[in-house]
Image (spheres, helix red, strand yellow):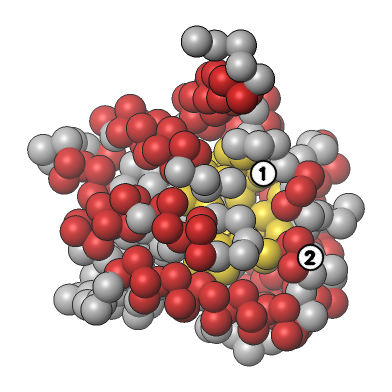
Amino acid sequence: MTFSVGQLPRFAVMGILNVTPDSFSDGGKFVGVDAAVRHGLALVAAGAAILDIGGESSRPGADPVSTADELARVVPVVERLAAEVDIPISIDTTKAEVADAALSAGATIVNDISGAQHDSLMLGTVVAHDAAVVLMHMQGEPRTMQVDPHYDDVVQDVCRYLQRRTEAAISAGVRSDAIVVDPGLGFGKTYAHNVELLDGVEALVHDLDVPLLIGASRKSFLGTMLSGAAVTDRESATVATSVLAFLHGAAIVRVHDVAASVAAARVLDSVTVRTRQGVMA
């Protein structure tokens, strides 16, 4: 199945499926293939437009995972889910070998937190499979990214980076309708940087020529906003970021609790469609 962003609903919700023992929100819950597949099917039933499967934690301070371990975690899950669901499957990886195996197993999108820079073979792998790619901004790497991140102007700096990575992907042969960009909330950003980026979603959408994905789900800056709320108590704040992102032009939100953001997206879609049609006062 060839994927293009035009196939997505107006407000698309990407469901997170972590098959890792150490992800910050749900690490260890879905490490077995059967458990992961059950959760993936539940996310689809809840209305996910994309499933994003990851086998390596990218939380701050996380240690790298070997290619062999990552392959063992994700490929059986991708293979099973690709045979059972009719929505696009994304593989969350920075390794071209893992991307290649997952795409061969039925994934159609690569979600690369390094902006396809960690592995020089990544863009070629995407092109070879005629796949789509999500290019994210991250300052540093997961082990070090929160050590004094600095920007001259975080919105403009991130925007320029994403423009350069988009140009690189197109030059490598990736279809322009198969590219999504992500400003990387929480990836080498302070609390203030994250707030500025959320406030700057409309500017990013205006200046970028490809769809924007926002991934704020349960992140620590939301906990700070809520006076130290635990990860499990950040869901309402996550939904608020989904609504904000969609209202300011984002195409996709990446979340753990799919049902809540899907419900918000359906309300937004109903209200804004009626408003455009002149039905509402």
Residue identified by numbered label 1: 50
Residue 237 appears in which quarter of the rendering?
Answer: top left
Residue 163 appears in which quarter of the rendering?
Answer: bottom right
Give amino acid for label 1. Answer: Ile
Give amino acid for label 2. Answer: Ala
Can you tell which mark lies on residue 125? none
Residue 160 appears in which quarter of the rendering?
Answer: bottom left
Query: Would you place residue 164 above or below residue 2 in this image?
Result: below
Query: Would you place residue 274 above or below residue 22 in this image?
Result: above
Mark 2 or mark 1: whose residue is earlier in sequence: 1
**Nearer-the-camera pick, 235 or 192:** 192
The picture places residue 117, in percent across and down from the top left corner, at 55, 83
Q: Is residue 244 visible?
A: yes
Direction from residue 52 to residue 109 in the image, left or right: right
Query: Would you place residue 163 above or below residue 75 in this image?
Result: below
Direction from residue 236 to residue 246 in the image, left or right: right
Residue identified by numbered label 2: 131
Residue at position x 61%, y 75% in the image: 166
Q: Is residue 143 visible?
A: no
